[in-house]
Image: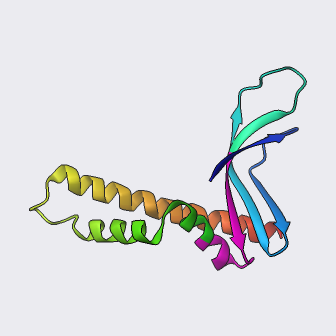
Amino acid sequence: MRCQKDYNGELPSLEVIQEGAILRVFFDFEDVPIQEEGESKSCICTNVDVVGATYEDIVSSIIRDKYSQDRVEAVMANHALKDDESIPEEKRDEYVNEYEAYQLYRLKAKQVANDVINTL
C-alpha cells in the first residue's frame, strides 16, 4: 500500500518498525515537494505489514501486497500462451510484459527482505 510519511534529514531507503508480531516495512521512498520552509519533509512510500519475521514471511507479504494469488495464476497462465500464434501478437507481448514485471517485483521483494533481515 502506498502511504505518506514525514521525515527529517535524508530520505530513507528502508524503515522497519516492529509492533508486536507485525513488522511494518516501508520502502520505495519518494520525495513530495516541500510546502513550507522549515517544516519536516514529506514523502510517499510503500508500506507492507508482515506477520512473522522470516525471509520467507517478508518476501511473501511484499509480493501478496501487490499480486493476489488469482493475479499470479493469471500472469502465469497468460505467460504460458506467449508462443500461441492464434493469439494476436500485441496480446502475447502484453503477456510477456506482465510476466517480466511480476518477476522484477519478485526480485525487488527478495532484495527488500534481505535488507529487512540485515536491519533486524
Total marks placed: 0
**Residue 102 location in percent, x, y?**
44, 62
Name which residue lies at 37% across and 72% down.
Answer: 73
Residue 32 vertical placement versus 89 (above, below):
above
Q: Nearer the viewer, residue 114 or 19?
A: 19
Name which residue lies at 66% across and 77% down.
Answer: 57
**Residue 112 location in percent, x, y?**
67, 63
Name which residue lies at 22% across and 53% down.
Answer: 91
Compared across the picture, whether 26 is left or right of 75 comes to right
Find residue 41 and report its image quarter. top right
**Residue 109 location in percent, x, y?**
60, 64
Direction top: furthest residue: 37
Compared across the picture, whether 62 is left or right of 53 comes to left
Q: Quadrant of the C terminus?
A: bottom right
Residue 21 vertical placement versus 38 (above, below):
below
Compared across the picture, whether 17 is left or right of 46 comes to right
Residue 2 vertical placement versus 68 (above, below):
above
Q: Nearer the viewer, residue 79 or 51?
A: 51
Find residue 111 and report its image quarter. bottom right
Residue 98 vertical placement versus 36 (above, below):
below
**Residue 98 location in percent, x, y?**
37, 57
Direction right: furthest residue: 38
Name which residue lies at 55% across and 67% down.
Answer: 64
What stretch of residues is rendered in magenta? Answer: 45-60
Compared across the picture, whether 7 is left or right of 75 comes to right
> What's the coloring here?
rainbow
Decide whether residue 32 is among the magenta residues.
Answer: no
